[in-house]
Image: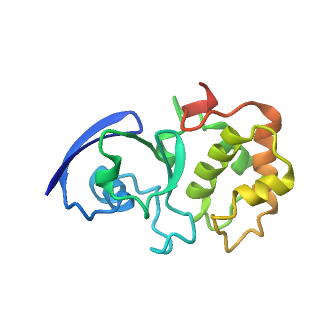
Amino acid sequence: MARISIKVDGVDYRDDIEPRTLLVHYLREQVGKTGTVVGCDTSNCGACTVHLDGASVKSCTVLAVQADGHEVTTIEGLATGGELHPMQRAFHENHALQCGYCTPGMIMQSIDLLHDNPDPTEQQVRAGLEGNLCRCTGYQNIVKAVLAVAQAEPVQSGSPGGAA
């Protein structure tokens, strides 16, 4: 067993885990963050995307022990005080989801995309979301939601409510 200390959505966790435990399984099974979903187990779909120290990662490709001493933000950690994060709100307002399975990962990746490029073109948004798959929407409304946030306000990676 390995002892880890991780801050998840602003809360400190200290746990003993098997060294081979994937971050996605740790988040879901030990921390209870079930909004981070397991989609493909092969790192192809991006449904498990979270922010590790502010940068998006596919949590199925990271061992929980690698996150020891670091900070993780999940989809559950974005809303604050009952207010959705601007990206969550934009996905809702632009009908950027259907079944919703890919939505947590898409939102987390979209926030990171805007952190790296606050004023992307449609093509840059599409390229920035390439590692996240959606089988329902055709991506048009997802791209529209990301562009709506980009035009409205700056979004900081891993920051609730879009504030720095």
x and y percent of residue 50 in the render? 50, 51
138 lies above or below 11: below
Please give the name of the residue rendered at 61% of the width and 37% of the height, measured from the top-left corner: 85
The quadrant in which the N terminus is found is: bottom left
Q: Is residue 91 left or right of residue 83?
A: right
- Identify the residue at image location x=84%, y=57%: 123
- Most extreme residue toward the top is 164
Q: Front-most of 117 and 137?
A: 117
Q: Is residue 107 above or below residue 89?
A: below
Find residue 84 and report its image quarter: top right
Query: Can you say which quadrant of the picture contains the C terminus?
Result: top right
Residue at coordinates 81% horizontally, 39% vertically from top-left? 119
Q: Nearer the viewer, residue 64 or 95?
A: 64
Let me know if residue 81 appears in the view. yes
Residue 108 locus on image (x, y percent) = 58, 49
Could you say which is closer to the camera, residue 110 or residue 75? 110
Q: Residue furthest front?
A: 66
Whether 155 is drawn above or below 98: the answer is above
In this rendering, position of residue 132 left or right of residue 153? left
Dividing the picture into quarters, in which one does residue 86 lie?
top right
Image position, residue 147 (x, y; %) = 81, 46
What residue is drawn where x is 34% and y is 58%? 63
